[in-house]
Image (cartoon, grey):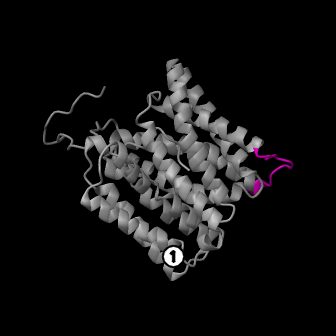
Amino acid sequence: MQKPLESTPANPPALEGEVPFIPETATPLSIGIALATIYIIWGSSFLAIRLAIADFPPFLMSGTRYMIAGVILYAFVWLRSGETPRLREWIAAFIAGLFLVVTANGGLVFAEQTVTSGLAAMGFATAPMWAVLIAAFWERWPTRAEWISLGFGFAGVVMLNLETDLSASPLGAIVLMISAMGWGFGSIISRRVSLPVGLMGSAATMLCGGLTLTLFGFAVGERLNHFPALESALAFGYLSIFSSLIGFSAYNFLMRNTRPAVFTSHAYTNPVVAVALGAVVEHERFNWLECVAMAMTVAALFCLTLQKQRASGTVVTETLATEPEP
């Protein structure tokens, strides 16, 4: 358990609802590199998914990607500490993986078959909003400022569904919404079950979720009947190694060395990166209504991130500590 911080000018006590941190060997340069890592890698994951599913079956691609990342991370933690999860921790990891990998990421890759990567990123970015709403039933009711932010953000989501690629693909839009809800619900669930501590929790969640999603892919008839093109294969490798392993390691470093408003800032920067990359690489185009809707959603996420949250209801600051990103 982390020792409470003493009240000194250099290290003030954490406010209620904030996660205290102890700067280790972090420097402004190392923190900047870590932030750039999660901004770019996680923001580019939406385009990488789009490229990967061009030749890979979506559910098998996502499931095996998490299995590979989970095995590597599990082996790393086990070799360093000899730590292995107990039965109840495996059960908790299965529950978390069912929502965070199967529902959230499985839904995301399915939606990206018909929805552009930029719009998929904006839709998936509403997960923190769903988490706040879901937490109202188990933890606490949102504050007035949070209700305003939620209303502003969901108004942006409604605008995204008007005269856009989402309206042309109602099934993709529905699945994308379920995907974001699954991430929000899984984030809350993962705080209420006995996951393994630290990186082992992420490894176990990725292993259980990845295996379940892979089996689901086989169950619905998915098969890899040909050797994937180089572009799709590289995208798959990028998702497995960079997005899951390197991205999470950078995020874990930021969790230990920065305030919540800093290490959760990817929630509103990743969609911007995804939209920019989609426009440059895939030549995705956005009209004025989509741009306004994106700006509204990002602004709402920014306001939610900066809200003072009580320890019993912190959603954005802690929920992603042990879950894989898109």
Q: Residue furthest top?
A: 82
Query: Was residue 224 drawn as part of the magenta stretch in this picture?
Result: yes
Q: Say which residue appears at 53% left-offset and 47% top-offset.
A: 325
Who is closer to the viewer here, 134 or 166?
Answer: 134
Residue 211 falls in image quadrant? top right
In the displayed structure, does residue 226 sit left or right of residue 272?
Answer: right
Q: Residue furthest right?
A: 226
The image position of residue 73, as x and y in percent, is 57, 32
Q: Provide the residue designation for mark 1.
A: 290
Examine the image and state in which quarter residue 278 appears: bottom right
Which secondary structure is most common in the magenta stretch? loop
Q: Nearer the viewer, residue 33 or 165?
A: 165
Q: Pick the residue in front: 275 or 145.
A: 145
Residue 320 visible here: no
In terms of image quadrants, where is residue 71?
top right
Q: Is residue 239 left or right of residue 297?
A: right
In the rendered view, does 114 fall on the left or right side of 181? right
Query: Magenta stretch containing residue 246, yes or no?
Result: no
Looking at the image, can residue 305 be seen? Answer: yes
Q: Which residue of the protein is positioned furthest toward the bottom in this rendering?
A: 288
Label 1: how many Cα within 10 Å (few below 14, some 14–19, many 20+): many
The image shows residue 180 at horizontal and vertical percentages of 51, 54
Image quarter hosting the N terminus: top left
| Residue 257 vertical position relative to residue 44 in the rendered view, above or below | above
| Residue kind at label 1, given as amino acid type | Glu
The residue located at (27%, 39%) in the rendering is 20
Q: Position of residue 108 (x, y in %)?
A: 60, 55
Q: Helix, strand or loop at disc 1?
A: helix
Residue depicted at x 28% and y 55%: 307
The picture places residue 295, in percent across and down from the top left corner, at 42, 72
Please provide the residue range marked out in magenta: 220-231
